[in-house]
Image (cartoon, rainbow, N blue to C red):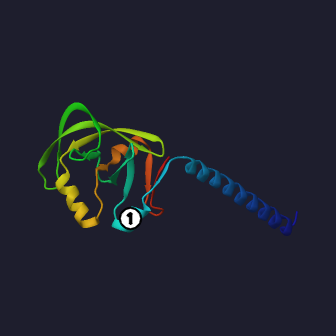
Amino acid sequence: MNVIDIIVILIILGIVGIIYWRYTRDSYIVKIKKKEIIEFKTSMELSGLPIIIFYQGDKAYNFLLDTGSNVSYVNIKSDLKTAPTGIKDTFMGSNGIDVGCEKVIVSLYRNNIKYEHLVHAADLNTAFVELKKEYGILITGILGNDFFTKYKYCLDFKELVAYQR
């Protein structure tokens, strides 16, 4: 075997490696694409906030995606239907003062998929009205890391999508 034969073999091995890598990478991407993907590009362009829409019947509700929050919240003043659990709790508001809340179960729908989640319900009207004044979007709730973990969502701020893994 001379040097040219070795170079040809290495080139062939390199091409086979590239083809294999492309095949496995593409099949991985296809697997991700088969899962639920939720786009928040429009809300980012309009308001600069990552917001996705869920539904109860034909009524749409805007939820802010908040990776800095360990739990999810809904505004008790909204017309969102919730199921009480009887569990009382508190959380620290943005002003540093404890806020009373109740843990409730909310059922949200998107693309015929039901998301049932335990959230903190409190009077968030003041904060959400301010967000509406500043950004033009009325928020119903905040989805925190508990939601992303439960439903295995990853937030991709390059593509501006939330996708399931």
Residue at 80 percent of width and 67 percent of height: 7
> x, y (%) of residue 6?
82, 64
40 left or right of 133? right
Q: Quadrant of residue 100?
A: top left
Along the line of sight, which residue is nearer the eye, 12 or 47?
A: 47
Residue highlighted by disc 1: 44
Farthest residue in the top direction?
86
Q: Indicate the amino acid at tag 1.
A: Met
109 left or right of 130? right
Q: Residues within 10 Å of mark 1 (few under 14, many from 20)?
A: some
> x, y (%) of residue 88?
18, 35
Along the line of sight, which residue is nearer the eye, 56 or 93?
A: 56
Q: Classify mark 1: helix, strand or loop.
A: helix
24 left or right of 121? right
Residue at 70 percent of width and 60 percent of height: 18
> x, y (%) of residue 69?
28, 50
Specify the quadrant that holds the N terminus. bottom right
> x, y (%) of residue 22?
67, 57
145 left or right of 94? right
